[in-house]
């Protein structure tokens, strides 16, 4: 991994020459929601915490589960399932809260069923041609990555937490 | 010299001086003969000039310089204080404030020359001191009254006749330094050069030099050093060093004696110097701009004395030239705007320090109890230590809060000036009487309370106070009174702003409300006076018959109200038609930590700010009455609407078989509401945290807090419920 990074860094100044040889890769954390796998750009992730007591906030938007205490900070937690119109979350031992750090909204927690692995994908491994897909959650996806045999939908994080969409 | 590190201090101190100038000019307006005040103003203007000069803000320096000149005339009784002068001075203050604002946002003074003002100042100077100019009283008068800066130069040629061998005469000075000298001599100070010889066997030369500087400090200011002050500090000089000082004293012997009194100083050469003294030996570039004396700034040449055009460039002339270069350099760097700071009383810091050490002691005692040899905890001493710890943390909290507290003075002290201006503009004589300026509030609150208060005061001045003839008719003194009273009341700070003017014409407000379709005529009949006055706080509800540029555009009281509510406070009006009105602003002392009552609704915990709770009552169900299909209770003469919290907080309705309801009565101003809760948990000190941006705009929840067990509890915003 370190080599890869070094290569990527070396790559930058003379990208044009080496463009076809080494491609810059972005790391994604692969999470499971329902039967599907989703990738979250690691640069947005502040932290991953286990499930804990969520305090409900009355009158908050429906997809917000409430708030949690993250080391003395109060952080809102949203259910991506509710936002995408899937069935409600089933809380179990594998449930995790991904804490996203966003410029505009600050810290926001996102509930996922499980966290699988970290993968690195280059642009060539991601199919960006997903916009015309008819799936209900397509607006939150900006590409589909190929990871070995499986496929990983790449979240468009800003759309996921954006309040206007939905 | 890189002065960016001093920018914060500069901004702080400049604001202070501006304030002090403003205050004193106000005093001066009322007591034109007050010598102390005049001196105070002179000093403040002088300090401003000095600071601006140090920071390289030439335009600001120029303006303050001319102000200082004017005051030196006033001080000498050559100019009498009149309202025209006061007006000019206030304009100058505004201009300086303008510079300061520019400095704050760009760390540069900008390009506004304020030539008109400077011209006005100089015109005033001339008109007032026609005779004063003939005065031989050296520096200040001559320089000031002639409007040009040549006068000191004229005498300059004669000065360097003294001891030609003295080292200070051959000091090599930078252009900047010479400018400084020029300025000092223009400002009426006497310049002296000193060369100090240290004894050969002196061990701590730098320390001796320091003592010499210290001694000179009593007489005046050191303007230039040779070698540089840094080198002197680092002992990078042989046995002599030279300085040029500016002083108001002419007693050279006293200065010489004071310097010689420092031990291990062998000898001191001293003599008067002028900026010219250093011209000859100076670097060529210093004298390069000299051949263009025609390029004088217009205001300087306006009344140029027939003195021979000298080599040194007058400040007025050099300023516009030097400044653009400096400005260019600074803009390129684009320095960050200054950070917000709080000046903390050293005493507060000391007590903070003490409490932290006590905290450490408390921790250590706990450690020693837990590691006692028997392995068993002595529960008695354990409890004692916990109690001790509790006390220390409470004190610590209090101290930290105190550090954040600042007097509202910094915000309200600009108001007298504002009222004065308004008074002239509106042609209504009025006075502002302020009390309790020392009342302390959280820094953030103090910063933001200025605008709402200003608005209320403008309102009072514009709408409240009547025209003098009307006041006379009503049997009131012609001069109106506006007051601002601040005081602490429990956990709140109350600021009352009011006037003895006409009061609010509730009938007119009522008519307006009907006209605007807010209420029907029938409804209006049953409104209380208080409810009618509330209309004034509605968006775009202006009562001003005509729009003035002071107030009355309809964006008024509603903004005041929302601003104050954003700070966790509220505002109320009391008015008597014909006798004036009073706005009462209630603000919380602190924003971060509050005392709260913890309650339970079903299985969820909520906090209610203790300050808003009036009482807690047990109400039998049978006592619930209905008014317009809403539940109310009758309590000690008050009819209080009931709010079912479980309902409000979106719980599924559930059967309640209890006979008694626990009701928390909360108040906001004079309004009340009863919150039905399931369980009371007790009082607790809670730290208020924000809910995060995404769900912040929640109407009934004002924030969250973290309980002892790490759980998050929400804070109910009772103000929004009433």
Image (cartoon, helix red, strand yellow):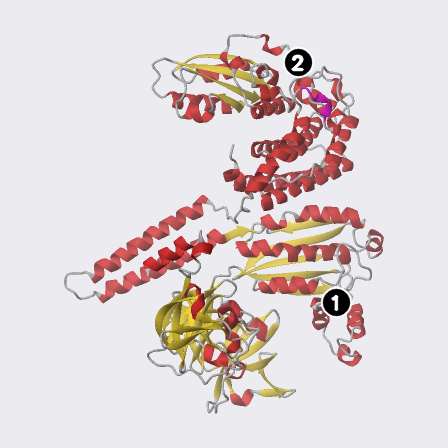
Residue B41 visible at all: no
The residue closer to the viewer here, B714 or B101, is B101
- Chain to which mark 2 belongs: B
Q: Which mark is residue A67?
A: none
Instruction: Read off the chain for label 1.
Output: B
Magenta span has A81? no
Give, as a single range, the part of the protein colored magenta.
B291-296
Residue B163, given in percent of the width and then of the height, sits at: 54, 7
Q: Residue B667, relative to residue B387: is it above or below?
A: below
Residue B516 x/y as whole percent: 78, 73
Number of on-image labels: 2
The C terminus of chain B sits in image quarter: bottom right
**Residue drawn at (42%, 75%) of the image:** A152
**Mark 2 highlights which residue?**
B155
Under tag 2, what secondary structure? helix
Q: Which residue is at the front of the view, B391 or B267?
A: B267
Please say if B392 is above or below B152.
below
Which residue corresponds to the image point at 63% horizontal and 54% vertical from the top-left? B450
Q: In this rendering, is residue B54 above or below B263?
A: below
> For the residue labelled by badge 1, is the local secondary structure a helix, a strand or a loop?
loop
Residue at the spot of label 1:
B541
Q: Is residue B295 magenta?
A: yes
Dot 1, how many residues are within 10 Å of its Cα: few (below 14), some (14-19), or many (20+)? many
């Amino acid at each position: 991994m370190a080599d890869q990074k070094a290569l990527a860094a070396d790559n930058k100044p003379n990208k044009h020459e080496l463009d076809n040889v080494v491609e810059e890769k972005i790391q994604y954390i692969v999470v499971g929601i329902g039967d599907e796998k989703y990738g979250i750009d690691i640069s947005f992730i502040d932290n991953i915490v286990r499930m804990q007591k969520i305090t409900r906030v009355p009158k908050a938007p429906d997809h917000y589960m409430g708030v949690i205490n993250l080391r003395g900070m109060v952080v809102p937690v949203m259910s991506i399932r509710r936002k995408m119109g899937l069935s409600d979350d089933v809380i179990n031992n594998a449930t995790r809260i991904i804490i996203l750090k966003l410029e505009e909204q600050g810290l926001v927690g996102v509930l996922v069923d499980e966290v699988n692995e970290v993968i690195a994908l280059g642009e060539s491994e991601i199919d960006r041609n997903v916009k015309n897909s008819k799936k209900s959650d397509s607006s939150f996806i900006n590409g589909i990555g190929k990871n070995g045999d499986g496929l990983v939908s790449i979240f468009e994080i800003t759309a996921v937490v954006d309040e206007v969409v939905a | 010299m890189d002065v960016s590190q001093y920018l914060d201090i500069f901004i702080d101190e400049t604001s202070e001086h501006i304030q002090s100038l403003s205050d004193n000019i106000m005093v001066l307006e009322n007591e034109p003969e007050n010598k102390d005040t005049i001196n105070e103003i002179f000093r403040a203007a002088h300090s401003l000039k000095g600071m601006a000069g140090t920071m390289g803000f030439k335009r600001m320096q120029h303006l303050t310089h001319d102000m200082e000149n004017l005051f030196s005339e006033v001080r000498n009784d050559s100019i009498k204080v009149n309202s025209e002068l006061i007006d000019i001075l206030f304009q100058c203050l505004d201009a300086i404030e303008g510079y300061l604002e520019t400095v704050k946002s760009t760390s540069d003074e900008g390009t506004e020359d304020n030539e008109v003002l400077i011209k006005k100042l100089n015109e005033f100077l001339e008109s007032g001191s026609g005779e004063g100019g003939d005065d031989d009283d050296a520096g200040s008068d001559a320089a000031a009254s002639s409007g040009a800066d040549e006068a000191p130069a004229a005498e300059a040629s004669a000065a360097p006749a003294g001891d030609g061998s003295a080292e200070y005469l051959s000091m090599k000075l930078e252009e900047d330094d010479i400018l400084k000298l020029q300025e000092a001599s223009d400002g009426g100070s006497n310049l002296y050069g000193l060369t100090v010889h240290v004894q050969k066997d002196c061990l701590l030369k730098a320390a001796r030099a320091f003592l010499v500087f210290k001694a000179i400090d009593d007489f005046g200011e050191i303007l230039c050093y040779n070698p540089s002050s840094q080198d002197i500090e680092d002992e990078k000089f042989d046995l002599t060093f030279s300085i040029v000082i500016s002083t108001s004293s002419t007693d050279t012997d006293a200065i010489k004696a004071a310097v010689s009194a420092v031990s291990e100083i062998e000898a001191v050469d001293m003599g008067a110097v002028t900026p010219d003294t250093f011209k000859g030996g100076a670097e060529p570039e210093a004298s390069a701009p000299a051949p263009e004396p025609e390029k004088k700034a217009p205001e300087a040449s306006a009344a140029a004395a027939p003195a021979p055009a000298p080599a040194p460039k007058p400040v007025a002339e050099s300023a516009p030239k030097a400044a653009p270069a400096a400005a260019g350099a600074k803009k390129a760097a684009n320095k960050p705007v200054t950070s917000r700071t709080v000046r903390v009383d050293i005493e507060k810091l000391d007590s903070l320090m003490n409490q932290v050490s006590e905290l450490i002691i408390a921790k250590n005692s706990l450690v020693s109890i837990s590691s006692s040899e028997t392995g068993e905890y002595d529960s008695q001493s354990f409890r004692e230590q916990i109690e001790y710890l509790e006390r220390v943390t409470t004190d610590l909290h209090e101290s930290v809060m105190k550090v954040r507290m600042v007097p509202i003075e910094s915000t309200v002290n600009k108001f007298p000036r504002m009222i004065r201006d308004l008074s002239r503009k509106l042609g209504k004589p009025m006075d502002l009487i302020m009390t309790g300026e020392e009342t302390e509030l959280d820094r953030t609150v103090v910063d933001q309370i200025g605008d709402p208060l200003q608005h209320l005061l403008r309102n009072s001045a514009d709408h409240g106070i009547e025209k003098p003839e009307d006041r006379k008719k009503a049997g009131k003194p012609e001069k109106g009174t506006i007051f601002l009273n601040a005081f602490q009341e429990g956990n709140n700070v109350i600021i009352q702003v009011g006037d003895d003017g006409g009061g609010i014409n509730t009938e007119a407000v009522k008519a307006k409300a009907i006209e605007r379709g807010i209420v029907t005529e029938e409804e209006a009949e049953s409104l209380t006076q208080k409810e009618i006055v509330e209309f004034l706080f509605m968006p775009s509800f202006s009562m001003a018959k005509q729009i003035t540029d002071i107030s009355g555009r309809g964006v008024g009281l509603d903004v005041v109200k929302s601003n104050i509510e954003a700070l966790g406070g509220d505002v109320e009006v009391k008015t008597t038609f014909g006798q004036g009105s009073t706005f009462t602003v209630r603000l919380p002392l602190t924003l971060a930590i509050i005392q709260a009552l913890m309650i339970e609704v079903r299985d969820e915990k909520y906090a209610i700010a203790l300050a808003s709770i009036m009482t807690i009552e047990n109400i039998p169900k049978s006592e619930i009455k209905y008014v317009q299909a809403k539940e109310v209770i009758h309590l000690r003469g008050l009819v209080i609407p009931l709010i079912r919290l479980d309902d409000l907080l979106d719980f599924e309705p559930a059967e309640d078989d209890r006979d008694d309801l626990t009701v928390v009565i909360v108040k906001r101003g004079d309004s009340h509401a009863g919150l039905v809760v399931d369980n009371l948990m007790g009082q607790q000190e809670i730290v208020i945290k924000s809910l995060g941006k995404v769900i912040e705009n929640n109407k009934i929840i004002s924030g969250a807090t973290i309980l002892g067990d790490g759980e998050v509890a929400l804070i109910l915003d009772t103000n929004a419920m009433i």
